[in-house]
Image: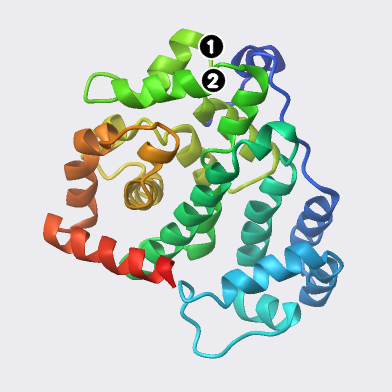
Amino acid sequence: MSQELSAEQIQQALQGISVPPQPQIMVDLQMEQYMPDPDLEVIARLIAQDPGLSGALLKIVNSSYFGLSNKIASIQRAVNLLGSRSIINLINALSIKGEMSDDTIVTLNRFWDTAQDVAMTCLTLAKRTGAQAVDEAYALGLFHDCGVPLMLKRFPNYMSVLEQAYANAGPDCRVVDTENNAFNTNHAVVGYYTAKSWRLPEHVTDAIANHHNALAVFSDESSRNSQLKNLLAILKMAEHICSSYRVLGNQAVDHEWNAIGHLVLDYVGLSDYDFESMKLSIRELGAH
């Protein structure tokens, strides 16, 4: 999906959905990040101006998932410790919810709770497998389904189609195939364009575009796309652990995981038993 599309093709793909603009704080932060010598004090000052974001950022950094030995009380300390790129990926992820909190989204409170759970689980899996930068894993977890509320805003019957999509999912049918048949677009495409316009790292936007294309991605056993595979493996495990199929798809069984789980676990080198025990320990973390 990396090839550049024309404006008309993008309009076609978005089917009249408007992508929320990036908040000013993100624009300012990225301007500073792209300087030849980014000033961490300026970055910390910008974040500190927004109490909501500051609080949310410190909450993540101090969570049991992050596993730091000492609590961090100041944004400046967090920025110094994690570096500008990590902080900006985390802030980007945290901002997406704020840009979508209108009437439609109130009905999606459970959606955002699950997105937060998936993001925290991605972060934990990234730390435990050592395969991926934790900030990118977190940003992917929070951002990967941001197309869902945007689809719902545009198509009032979207949630029932999404439930059908999760019911149909399997080796021969992707979740997004059912959406494409109904709407000529899907939440992965819409999420991809949103993440791209918010300037998320390219491999994160690729993972968003492909997050219901895991069977094809992992069936390719060549060493291509290792960054994409690392991110997707973490996301698919996290979605399964957090029961996205139940919250979004209203399904009792994770049909998608049943089709792809063995490939994902093979890729990361986990046995079913290892994965089950990891799943239990992560769920315990989340219960505290």
Q: According to the image, what is the colour scheme of the structure?
A: rainbow
- Residue to which mark 1 is pinned: 183
Residue drawn where x is 36% and y is 46% of the image: 243
Locate residue 19 relative to residue 246 in the image: left or right: right
How far apart are labels 2 and 1 at the CA level?
Answer: 9 Å
Mark positioned earlier in the residue sequence (2 or 1): 2
As drawn, 90 above or below 208: below
Specify the quadrant that holds the C terminus.
bottom left
Q: How many residues crowd around disc 2 within 10 Å: few (fewer than 14), some, or many (20 or more)?
A: many
Residue 226 in the image: state x and y as whole percent. 34, 48
Label 2 with label 1: CB-CB less than 8 Å: yes
Q: Nearer the viewer, residue 101 or 219?
A: 101
> Could you tell me which residue is drawn at 41 percent across and 67 percent down?
287
Where 100 sits versus 152, above or below?
Answer: below
Tell me the SS state at disc 1: helix
Under mark 2, the amino acid is Tyr
Q: Mark 1: few, some, or many residues within 10 Å (few <14, many ≥20)?
A: some
Seen at 44% across and 9% down, the residue is 181
**Whole-percent x and y of residue 213?**
36, 30
Q: Is residue 213 above or below residue 269?
A: above
| Kind of residue at badge 1 | Phe
**Residue 245: where, in percent of width, then height?**
36, 37
Checking the image for residue 158, the label placed there is 2
Specify whether 62 is left or right of 175.
right
